[in-house]
Amino acid sequence: KLKKVFKMEDSITVALMAGFISYIGLVITKEQKISDFRQEWINSIRNDVADLMKELHHFYMAYLVAQKESQSNIEFLKNNLLITNQIQFLVHKIKLRLNPDDSDGIIKLLDEIMNIITSPTELKDDENFDKLTEKLNTKAHELFKSEWERVKRGEKWFRWSKWFLFLGSVYLIGYSIVGLS
């Protein structure tokens, strides 16, 4: 009878260990998929920000040329509707990809940029435009860095699961060793 009890306990221990190993595999697979999606998101938003910066530069250079030709701001905006619409499209695309709570001021900067490029009175302040685009560039880099750090660390659930599984494995191994002696 005593041997049967140990065998049953051994079977339970092995089953628990197999369950833990399966759970580890599940958590790792899920974490990898989340990391893949997050990296894809980072790449997509990076491309959108780069496209936006290109269009803003194009817009700004066209504005400087219009100023040299003594074109009014209203006339300039009428003549550059396509680029303004492209900038608006990219701004909306970026804003939709960001969480308003985690965007670290990027959404506000995008709104300020939109205000400048659609308002004839705001276009006059060249320095303001340069400061905002530089701020956007800096904030975007900060966002990419923090998201990359999150990908490297893993999600909170994954980090908690690793510790739980580690402690559970130590417990089961210790239990198995004590049970075998």
Image: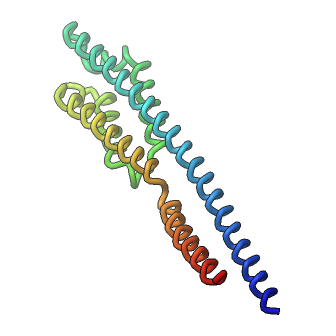
x and y percentages locating residue 54 in the rendered image: 36, 21
Residue ID at (78%, 82%): 8
x and y percentages locating residue 151 in the rendered image: 46, 48
Horizontally, residue 23 falls left or right of residue 46, namely right
Of residues 174 and 75, the one drawn nearer to the viewer in this rendering: 174
Query: Looking at this rendering, what residue extends furthest in the front direction?
Result: 181
x and y percentages locating residue 33 in the rendered image: 59, 47
| Residue 148, image quadrant | top left
Residue ID at (28%, 20%): 60
Of residues 120 and 181, the one drawn nearer to the viewer in this rendering: 181
Residue ID at (25%, 12%): 66
> How many labels, in total?
0
Above or below, 6 relative to 159: below
Above or below, 23 relative to 112: below
Above or below, 170 relative to 52: below
| Residue 5, image quadrant | bottom right
The quadrant of the rendering that contains the N terminus is bottom right
Of residues 32 and 46, the one drawn nearer to the viewer in this rendering: 32
Query: Looking at this rendering, what residue extends furthest in the top direction?
Result: 69
Horizontally, residue 155 falls left or right of residue 112, namely right
The quadrant of the rendering that contains the C terminus is bottom right
Residue ID at (31%, 16%): 75
